[in-house]
Image: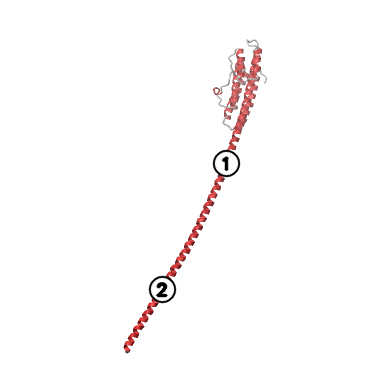
Amino acid sequence: MGKLTTYRDKRAELRAHAAALKATAMTEAKLAAKETRHKAKEAHRVELAEARKRAKLAGKNADRKAKREAKRAKRQDALAQKASRRDRKAEKTLAKQERATIKREAKFLAKDRKAAEKIEAAGRKHEYQLAEMELKKLEGTKLGKEDVQRWLSLAKVATPVLLPMVYKLVSNAQGSDRSAGAGAVDLKAAGIDATGPGAALGARIVRLEQTLDQLELDRRGDRQVEDFITSTRSRLKDLRTAVETAETTPTSQRREVHSAISGELDRVNKDVLARLGVAP
């Protein structure tokens, strides 16, 4: 009986130990599972927190980017408006400069036209003085003195086209072949390339040269007159060169040159008329 009891007790003890081990294992397994679930839950919570943080940061970045884009668009729009205002201002300035240029050119043209008219008037005066000189020589011709005087009176108020006709009429009445001043002056044929006041000065030079031709015919053999004609032709040649050179100079300088040439032509005209015996 003693051995059997001992065996049973031992088996009971083994079963109790195995049950204790099993219970311990189950407890540890439960604890491990609980710990695993806790860790998983904590990891999920951390992940959600990080996801929310990333989402919040992404939202902030998107807002900042949107603000930067809006600010950049606003700045570009302001620059575009500023450039547009600058362009409009430049266009207004350019238009104003163009109007001023047109006005200045019109003023220069008016001055040139006035200078040309003044020069042409001086040339007409020269021709009229020559016509008066011819009038004094008409006594005894077929054309009456009163008729010529009537033409001369008309020439004072007539157009520049009429005066050469009067001078031609006087020359024809005198029976000569001379045609100085007869008709308009052909500057190209005379070798003068000029426009505006320069053309008027060129016409005066050509008429004075024609007058010298007449003087040379009338006073042939007079040494003093021949010397005068030679020196005067040299002066007129220099004035021809000055007229053509003035065409390439600036407007303001050209006007001064034209004025100087006109003054010199007045002096030449006075000397020629004095040689012809016509009071200036």
Q: Residue at x 53, y 50 (%)?
A: 73
Q: Position of residue 130 (x, y in %)?
A: 64, 18
How many circles with numbers are drawn on the protein? 2
Question: Residue flagged by tag 2: what amino acid is it?
Answer: Lys
Q: Is residue 122 above or below residue 13?
A: above
- Label 2 packing within 10 angstroms: few (<14), some (14-19), many (20+): few
Q: Position of residue 97 (x, y in %)?
A: 59, 37
- Between the residue at mark 1 and the residue at mark 2, the CA separation in whole angstroms equals 85 Å
Q: Position of residue 35 (x, y in %)?
A: 43, 71
Q: Residue furthest front?
A: 1
Q: Is residue 47 above or below residue 225?
A: below
Please identify the quadrant where the N terminus is shown: bottom left
Give the mark nearer the N terminus: 1 vs 2: 2
Q: Residue furthest bottom?
A: 2
- Label 1 packing within 10 angstroms: few (<14), some (14-19), many (20+): few
Please identify the quadrant where the C terminus is shown: top right
Residue 238 appearing in the image: no
Q: Residue at x 58, y 39 (%)?
A: 92
Q: Is residue 33 above or below residue 224?
A: below
Q: Is residue 8 above or below residue 115?
A: below
The secondary structure type at the circle numbered 2 is: helix
Closer to the camera in the image, 62 or 117: 62
Residue behind mark 2: 30
The mark closer to the camera, 1 or 2, is 2
Horizontal relation, residue 45 to residue 143: left or right:
left
Closer to the camera in the image, 119 or 56: 56
Q: Position of residue 237 (x, y in %)?
A: 58, 25
Q: How is the image coloured?
A: secondary structure
Residue behind mark 1: 88
Quadrant for residue 180, please give it. Answer: top right
